[in-house]
Amino acid sequence: MDQPEAPCSSTGPRLAVARELLLAALEELSQEQLKRFRHKLRDVGPDGRSIPWGRLERADAVDLAEQLAQFYGPEPALEVARKTLKRADARDVAAQLQEQRLQRLGLGSGTLLSVSEYKKKYREHVLQLHARVKERNARSVKITKRFTKLLIAPESAAPEEEALGPAEEPEPGRARRSDTHTFNRLFRRDEEGRRPLTVVLQGPAGIGKTMAAKKILYDWAAGKLYQGQVDFAFFLPCGELLERPGTRSLADLILDQCPDRGAPVPQMLAQPQRLLFILDGADELPALGGPEAAPCTDPFEAASGARVLGGLLSKALLPTALLLVTTRAAAPGRLQGRLCSPQCAEVRGFSDKDKKKYFYKFFRDERRAERAYRFVKENETLFALCFVPFVCWIVCTVLRQQLELGRDLSRTSKTTTSVYLLFITSVLSSAPVADGPRLQGDLRNLCRLAREGVLGRRAQFAEKELEQLELRGSKVQTLFLSKKELPGVLETEVTYQFIDQSFQEFLAALSYLLEDGGVPRTAAGGVGTLLRGDTQPHSHLVLTTRFLFGLLSAERMRDIERHFGCMVSERVKQEALRWVQGQGQGCPGVAPEVTEGAKGLEDTEEPEEEEEGEEPNYPLELLYCLYETQEDAFVRQALCGLPELALQRVRFCRMDVAVLSYCVRCCPAGQALRLISCRLVAAQEKKKKSLGKRLQASLGGSRLSHCKLPDAVCRDLSEALRAAPALTELGLLHNRLSEAGLRMLSEGLAWPQCRVQTVRVQLPDPQRGLQYLVSVLRQSPALTTLDLSGCQLPAPMVTYLCAVLQHQGCGLQTLSLASVELSEQSLQELQAVKRAKPDLVITHPALDGHPQPPKELISTF
């Protein structure tokens, strides 16, 4: 007896087999039966889709087999044919087709299940498949044990709440821990009863977005999430799908995730509103434009991964389906053109309590966990970095190794780069001396592989690539790469990827410092290529560039030389320095200078609220690169090429503030800071390192424009003015300031230690609070220039101003009142002040001998 053929497992061969089986069955029919089959076939569409009668009317058996296979796909076509044969009174042929189908395609009893019956089977499959996850050390653990709750904050939080920094504790209405209740809230209806169809989870690399997405899938399968809303949920790893060769339909991708090939996919797709697609790593999708720009619109159309995923994102494909999208924090801007009315939420990592829980889960031994946690807690910078789960894992891994070897836990790390490098060096230092050279060589090759992947936008690597670099079966493969099996055309395809994408980017950056003699192997592989390629805010090279700068500090370079036994060339560092200095000329994202004096009416309107995430702030990314070096002299030299630190549309989080404050400390003398349309937050009682307090440094000037300044922020800035003797200029342009806020700022300016010489204020509305600022003139000998251009000054305010100007304690030398409408009485009072104090310069058109402009041409703020 002949043995049945092995079940076919890939789409191409399955389609050929389906055609063969269909043709064999149809050739068994008489002409009358074939005619009856054609008529029954036009009414049989499983999802409301039937082959048009024009294609069926004159079709013979060959044509019918081809039409069925192409229109429905392999398995659905066979199921449609089986049911139609039964309705056409060809039950024996239908039974024969089913038998052959089971032998050739390996379809089980799932074929006969309805959608409602298959739901249970699919949920059980998901629970079994995702019950355990691999640790980065390849150990398999239960997902319920591995998952540690993260802070997730909705986009709609108030400005003060939005900037809740990592490691800060949530309060009511703020970030919530990622438990089942929080996950359920992601798709909750708004006040008008509308439910978002697309939810975006965004956050930095290694923050735990993928794990959170997998936990959502697992909780759905366990019956804890979206009950009564979602019948089927599918996890689609974007990076992996984009790298797959060939074309596949969405139906194919769904079938790949099912426990058998008998899933009723057409019936599932017939109710798209009951489906949830989890698109993990959507920032991997290529930018819009080019041949892949047109999104796929048919779930049964075989297309590239980019077109299928693009269709889901843009809602061109299954517009009523639910989407949960994960992306890095810098990428939502690029996705804005694809997404349809998304609801965004920010993954903010571990809170302080969650960090402690993670340490105890990781170490298991309570004594070691307590010792390691206490050490990290005492290192404030290192403890702050642990809000990122992947960084926390690296720190725990290194500390566990140090404890097992009985070493001192005295190594400190201030940046993400230093933490990653510490992990690499700990691997090298723990290896036997005899294995050292081999391990160094393997790590060099691994870095080379990482660089090729980053530059080529690849995260998956074939076995032959590892073999060519002699990495297969090596220790570095075990430590840094995870194995993955993907369904291939003829056989299972084995691929490898780095334990975390951010680690691939770190090793790619390290490769530039490990080049022999500092000379690139190829012209295309030099550091210049990396930096020139990272000229766009949305570039996929941003994190690699940041890591590169972190490795350029003298201390890091010495570590690399010591552990890799090589000399690191200064050429890379000098090239990076020239690159930063070159950014000073027309940096993307830097707003034009706010001109002083009169403006046209078209310039006086309040700027429209910018949509968050539309354009990442490129100057801030430059500051992050410099921060990673932690080398003051290098940062100071780099900043010499920038006329000022100008940031716009930044929603400052705790890490942003730390980065900015460090760069401010390294500023060359006289450099100014300008913040435009930024969202600033006050310090919390427990964590008082606010923006204002951190800017007590060597700035030559500080200018804030179109910013929202709550009273608490004004209080912080006021304290900064008292303790920043090098701060000589303060600009508050078009900001929303309350009377109380102006009073607190004025108190800071009046402080004896305050050395601010120039104050520029432009307020959108008349402010009684200006009286506090004017009163400072009597008490501040340092204040020599006051610019009130564009302010609205009622006559009583001008009278008070003139009285203060003539006070003996007033040392003001210049008063600018450009674009200020003044009454005749006010003009006379100012003329009297000029006669009494001839050295005081008061600039106003009417006082300079020019007529005051008509009222309708005067700017009002």
Image (cartoon, grey):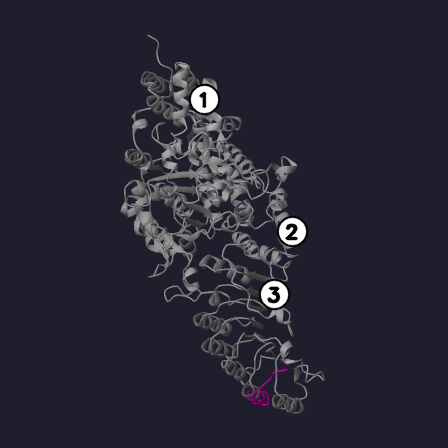
Residue toward you, 30 or 834: 30
Please tell me whether mark 1 sits on a helix, a strand or a loop: helix
Q: Which mark is residue 277?
A: none
Q: Which image quadrant for residue 788?
A: bottom right
Q: Residues within 10 Å of mark 3 (few under 14, many from 20)?
A: some
**On-image quarter of the N terminus:** top left
Residue 616: % across, % down:
53, 54
- Asked whether 431 or 612 is in front, the reply is 612
Q: Earlier in the sequence, mark 1 or mark 3?
A: 1
Q: Is residue 851 above or below residue 507?
A: below
SS for tag 2? helix
The tag earlier along the polypeptide, 2 or 1, is 1
- Nearest to the observer: residue 827 or residue 680: 827
What residue range appears in magenta? 799-814
Which residue is the site of mark 2? 578
Percent position (x, y) of residue 303? 51, 33
For the C terminus, the image quarter is bottom right
Q: Position of residue 174 (x, y in %)?
A: 37, 60
Q: Which residue is mark 3?
A: 671
Three-letter residue code for mark 1: Leu
Amino acid on which disc 2 is placed: Arg
Q: Which mark is residue 64?
A: 1
Mark 2–mark 1 distance (CA, rounded to whole Å): 67 Å
